[in-house]
Image: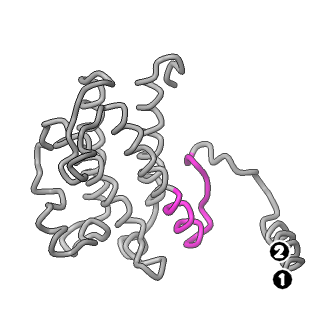
Amino acid sequence: MADLDDLKATLHQYLRGARNALIWKLDGLSEREARLPRTPTGNNLLGVLKHCLNVEAGYFGVTFGREFPTPEELVSMQAMEEDPQADFYAREDETKDGLIDLYRRVGAFADRTIEELPLDAPGQVPWWPADGRAVTLRKIIIHVTCDLARHAGHADLMREQHDGAVGLRREKPNVPDAYDWPAYVTKLTKLADRFG
């Protein structure tokens, strides 16, 4: 647990929490289940993880003049120009376990950037508009944590719809144990119907 008086450690803790939530949402899923589109726009659990690992590699890499050691494993800007969704699905030659491993390595890379630079370290986000490219590490940690948290929420819903697995963390899901969820849904439906 981070010292809440240490801003950098606290921000880093929340980033790691979002990252870990994304990884655990794939736990126990087959290759097909991880890839299967779960929304009308094709969102899938493995694609969300792949997008987030590319987000972290870019923001904690090139933004601060650093390069991920194996950039060929990431989705290139050229690939994104050819297919704007290239980072939201696993190609046939990519696997769930391979992408999880890559995300762990990207996470370690991002962690090193955070550990080695001060919060006010300047950076440039080349894909942002020119008048907003100048950033600090503080801003990027917050930006990426918000992005990852948003996608972790997507993953929460997709996984719950798949097999009912819910919660913030595997070891402490933060939802009531032995709760009568069908009765709860019925209660909320009746309440909503009063406004129909």
Percent across and percent down for residue 164 are 62, 66
Q: Amino acid at mark 2?
A: Ala
Under circle 1, the secondary element is loop
Percent across and percent down for residue 28 are 46, 62
Q: Amino acid at mark 1?
A: Gly
User: In the figure, residue 33 lies in which quadrant?
Assistant: bottom left
Under circle 2, the secondary element is helix
Mark 2, residues whose alpha carbon is within 10 Å: few (<14), some, or many (≥20)?
few
Question: Could you tell me if the residues under marks 1 and 2 are in contact, i.e. CB atoms within 8 Å?
Answer: yes
Residue 165 among those drawn in magenta: yes
**167 and 42: which is toward the camera:** 42
Percent across and percent down for residue 130 are 20, 49
Colour pattern? one colour
Decide: is 117 above or below 160: above
- Residue at 32% over, 60% down: 51
Point out which mark residue 192 bears: 2
**74 and 126: which is toward the camera:** 126
Decide: is 163 above or below 25: below
Residue 20 among those drawn in magenta: no
- Residue at 42% over, 79% down: 41
Foreground disc of the pair 1, 2: 1
Secondary structure, magenta segment, majority class: helix
- Residue at 30% over, 71% down: 89
Percent across and percent down for residue 25 are 48, 58
Q: Which range is magenta? A: 153-170
Q: Label 1 belongs to which residue?
A: 196
Q: CA distance from mark 1 to mark 2?
A: 7 Å
Decide: is 91 above or below 64: below
